[in-house]
Image (spheres, grey):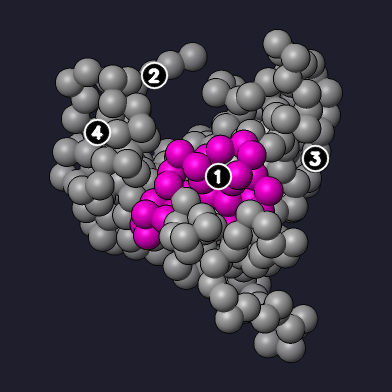
Amino acid sequence: TRGVPQSRYYYKRFSVGGGKANVSLIVLDSSPCQSMYRSDDPSGWDPCGSSLPNDCPGCTFHANVVAQSCATQLAWLKTTIAQVPEGDWRIAMIHAPASDIDVEDLITPLQQGNFDLVVNGHVHLLAHYTVDGVGTYITSGAGCMVHMENRNGVTPATVERNNTSLGASSCTSYSTWHTCEIVFQRTVPGFAVHTFSEDMMSLTTTLIDENGNTLHSTTTKKNSNSTGPTPPPSNGPTPAPTPANKCCYYSDSVCYTGQTCCNTEGQSYSKYTCDDTQWGTKHNCIWDWRESKCIVG
């Protein structure tokens, strides 16, 4: 169903399970908190941008975004979380994945507020990921615009390749304040189902494909993040060395995350080439809107 939100971001409290438990739901507006949308470069705008110039005639997407203050929303979020009753289930909804939010840090208040579940859309796939190694973050954006398997001769391998080449992931390289790790991710049509246990002390999220098959399931215990996020260990595995040559060429056998995907002249691929299923896909090249260049994802 469709409806009109009561505001661009808001708080709502309601009961579930016949009154056995209460849910405090915070809905956030990610668009003003994404630098690619605030930028004057239209190549980073999803609607009304240079990549889809005729998608929405008369569209005022960018003007609406820059008219909003992410700092004001952050201040509202901190004040609102402080007023959430103890013992409630704490759930947040936001359009973009956590790692795409780079203007103000909206995620740390959710972590400090012991939120049980964060749900986002935006990327057209199904995913379960963590932030800073903790929490339950769910992407449920596979209801449309997914390269579907077995349609017009498209194979599952091609589906995964096409979506990856378009930079479709719940964890990107953009994150400014946090680390992000994929637990499960599939670029197939589907949806997420959230089910409370009988005693209302746990919440199971199930990712289901278009045929009703269960792809992945995870269970969150109420207030299970009460100890707060833990920093990444300092004595973990040694990261792969960054090669002296910052270019990743098509002919290279190994490339590293963050390198520039380069043509034979040592220049970044264009966005068109970056998205290409032959040239960009070999090293998982994605377009970095902030830097306007093609990088290894």
Determine whether the residue tagged by mark 4 lies in a helix, strand or loop.
helix
Residue 246 lies in magenta, yes or no?
Answer: no
Spatial CA span between label 2 and label 3 = 28 Å
Q: Earlier in the sequence, mark 4 or mark 1?
A: 4
The amino acid pointed to by label 4 is Phe
Q: Quadrant of residue 193?
A: top right
| Residue under pointer 1 | 167
- Distance from disc 2 to disc 4, alpha carbons, whole Å, reads 19 Å
Q: Tell which circle, 2 or 1, labels the residue nearer the N-terminal end.
A: 2
The answer to whether 206 is drawn above or below residue 33 in the figure is above
Query: Which residue is depicted at the point 25% across and 47% down?
Result: 41
Q: CA distance from mark 3 to mark 1?
A: 24 Å
Q: Secondary structure at mark 2?
A: loop
> For residue 272: magenta?
yes
* Amino acid under disc 1: Gly
Task: For the residues labelled 4 and 1, say whether their Cβ atoms are less than 8 Å apart.
Answer: no
Q: Which amino acid type is marked by label 3?
A: Ser
